[in-house]
Image (cartoon, grey):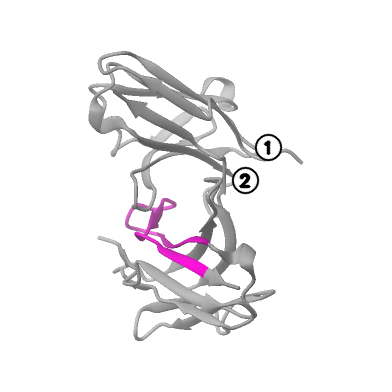
């Protein structure tokens, strides 16, 4: 079975500072993908970044980067230069190739609050 | 390009009443998903369609939930009869193919009284 764990229910960060949101996962699939989504108060889930399990380099998308440590089964999201608009729920998700193939499984999320 | 459109945005009903949610995916997206999101939780998959075929409905409570995707485009999710525990946000998502990233709609927030 696949499992996504986000241990931080809430995080605070000062505007313009960097913040790391933790995500660990568990799967027996040999190949899988890891995703981060942002959910602002409007409710829509917004795709941020993707990391494939066989990708050699950590993924980056603008101010977002994914710190992928395969041996530790962690996929932490790093947001640099935080902005007030970054305040939202953040969800880590995983998609395997065998277990529940092509279905996206989500963690419980972390609520990020950016302080001016 | 229009995103995933869901309606209604909010729905309040009394228990035992039927309710339906509608989703229009992004044009050209063959894969469509319905997710359930309880308060303070991550989304959980209810059903996934490839074109008009439901390829994974293992998490759909079939005694009261049903879904359809006629002509492989729009989709409707129905609950009949609704129970108090069905109060949640129902999210629709679509992707070009099963291996591509998902685009989500804004969801329908259901309150069952």
Does the magenta-highlighted stretch encompass residue B103? Answer: no
Disc 1 chain ID? B
Where on the picture, by quarter, is residue B72? top right
- In this orientation, which residue lies closer to the viewer: A89 or B46? A89
Q: How many marks?
A: 2
Mark sitting on residue B28: 1
Where on the picture, by quarter, is residue A69? bottom left
Q: Are marks 1 and 2 in contact (CB under 8 Å)?
A: yes
Q: What predominant SS class does the magenta segment belong to? A: strand
Compared to residue A39, the image places residue A87 above or below, namely below
Q: CA distance from mark 1 to mark 2?
A: 7 Å
For the residue carrying disc 2, how many other residues have a C-alpha within 10 Å: few (<14), some (14-19), or many (20+)? some
Residue at position x 55%, y 50% from top?
A: B102
Residue at position x 42%, y 69% from top?
A: A31
Compared to residue A84, the image places residue B12 above or below, namely above
Compared to residue A111, the image places residue A68 above or below, namely below
Residue at position x 29%, y 38% from top?
A: B58
Q: Horizontal placement of A35 versus B58: left or right?
A: right
- In this orientation, which residue lies closer to the viewer: B4 or A1? B4
Question: In x, y percent, where is residue A75?
Answer: 44, 76
Element under disc 2: loop
Q: Horizontal placement of B29 versus B55: left or right?
A: right
Question: In x, y percent, where is residue A19?
Answer: 52, 80
Position of the N terminus of chain B, as image quadrant, is: top right
Region of the chain picked out in magenta, as a range: A88-113
Kindly identify which residue carries mark 2. Answer: B96
Q: Horizontal placement of B79 versus A13: left or right?
A: left
Residue at position x 53%, y 20% from top?
A: B70
Element under disc 1: loop
Compared to residue A92, the image places residue A39 above or below, namely above
Mark sitting on residue A57: none
Q: Horizontal placement of A55 versus A31: left or right?
A: right
């Amino acid at each position: 079975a696949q499992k996504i764990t986000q241990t931080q229910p809430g995080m605070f960060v000062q505007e313009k500072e960097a913040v790391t949101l933790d995500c660990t996962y568990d799967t027996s699939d040999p190949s899988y993908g890891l995703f981060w989504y942002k959910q602002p108060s409007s409710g829509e889930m917004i795709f941020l970044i993707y990391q494939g399990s066989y990708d050699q380099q950590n993924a980056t998308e603008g101010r977002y980067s994914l710190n992928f440590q395969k041996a530790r089964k962690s996929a932490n999201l790093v947001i640099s230069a935080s902005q007030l608009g970054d305040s939202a729920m953040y969800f880590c998700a995983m998609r395997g190739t065998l277990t529940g193939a092509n279905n996206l499984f989500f963690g419980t999320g972390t609520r990020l609050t950016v302080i001016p | 390009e229009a995103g995933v459109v869901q309606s209604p945005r909010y729905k309040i009903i009394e228990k035992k009443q039927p309710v339906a949610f509608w989703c229009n995916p992004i044009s050209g997206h063959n894969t469509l998903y319905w997710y359930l999101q309880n308060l303070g939780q991550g989304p959980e998959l209810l059903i996934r369609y490839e074109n008009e075929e439901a390829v994974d409905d293992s998490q759909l409570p079939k005694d009261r939930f049903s879904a359809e995707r006629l002509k492989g485009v729009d989709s409707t999710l129905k609950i009949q009869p609704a129970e108090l525990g069905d109060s949640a946000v129902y999210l629709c998502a679509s992707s070009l193919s099963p291996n591509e990233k998902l685009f989500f709609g804004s969801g329908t927030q259901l309150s069952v009284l």
